[in-house]
Amino acid sequence: MEEKPVLRIGHLRITDHLILGVTKVKIHKGVETFQHSKILTVPMTGWNSIGKALVDGEIDIAFMLAPYAMELFHSGKKIKLILFSHKSGSIIVTNKRANIKKIEDFKGKTILIPYHLSVHHMLIDKLLNEKGLTTGIGKDVVFEVTAPSQIPKFIEYDEAGDIGGYIVAEPFGTQVIKKGLGEELALSKDIWPNHPCCVVVVRDEIISRYPDAILELTESLVKSGLLVHQKPETTAKIGAVFLNQSYDIIYSVLTEPADKLTTTELLPVLEDLDTIQNYLNEKISSMSGKIDLEKFVDLQFARAAGAK
């Protein structure tokens, strides 16, 4: 009998990637049995390392930022987007030492963003522009890219309050708020309701070699997405281990409010991806160009898995 392939799946320790942690536990506890593959989850520290590992073939599948994945596709990498990993889920936090009470107070400050090719970059830029603030080097507000897991440290060490705040995936917002160093200014869902952010991307070669394994994984991830909402206590326990965080922080992310992070609608929406690439190309110029989304997004697995 042929040995099952091991699918190496790269992710960050953020709640946007929690459905992968739920799937991992379901397999480990025998709640689900994978017939067509074994999975190996590979936690990484930042977005660059995930992109590089995917391109170099060190991982087969990546949970990654939608615009970063689009940029890799634009540069000729043979990958497909098969599923959204969540919707919404990020938070804007102000640095208490910077005395930010409203958007206009960010003038003259730095704002930390997790990556230049991100929905976070788009959302915070939009928010600032709507209040008449310019963004970029030498402008009203400067963005600085900082790996999500490093952001709490930057806030902790910024005694002068030069950093006005940041936008990031949870739990790195709630973590700083619970330490008393920051305050919630807005949730990403308040700026763009039900927005996509992280997606599941697979190398073409893996899709063509192991389609049954990819479908099986997709089905499990879709079910895991439903479980996150149905059982926040169980999910928070899984998340505490998978994301290396305290139970209280993950539970609070999942329940305050309950729709901060959405994992029940994972069917990729091409119009939403187009909105992102239009903004990042035309307003910020952080992408190298637009892509043909029909060629980049492969909906067959999400549809077969019953993703909404």
Image (cartoon, helix red, strand yellow):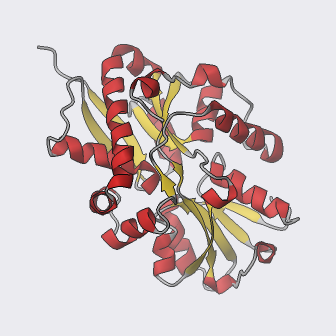
User: Could you tell whether 135 is left or right of 174 in the image?
Assistant: right
Question: Which residue does the image show at 41% across and 19% down from the upper left?
Answer: 207
Question: Which residue does the image show at 38% across and 51% down from the upper left?
Answer: 18
Q: Residue furthest right?
A: 132
Locate residue 244, reporting x and y percent.
32, 62
Q: Nearer the viewer, residue 130 or 52?
A: 130
User: Could you tell whether 181 is left or right of 231 in the image?
Assistant: right
Q: Nearer the viewer, residue 73 or 189?
A: 189
Name above or below for residue 204 compared with residue 29. above
Locate residue 144, reporting x and y percent.
67, 61
Is residue 12 visible to the viewer in this orientation of the structure?
yes
Name above or below for residue 226 compared with residue 132. above
Locate residue 3, reporting x and y percent.
16, 20
Split into 4 quadrants, where in the image is the N terminus? Answer: top left
Is residue 137 visible to the viewer in this orientation of the structure?
no
Locate residue 229, reporting x and y percent.
39, 54
Name above or below for residue 198 compared with residue 57. below
Q: Residue furthest left?
A: 1
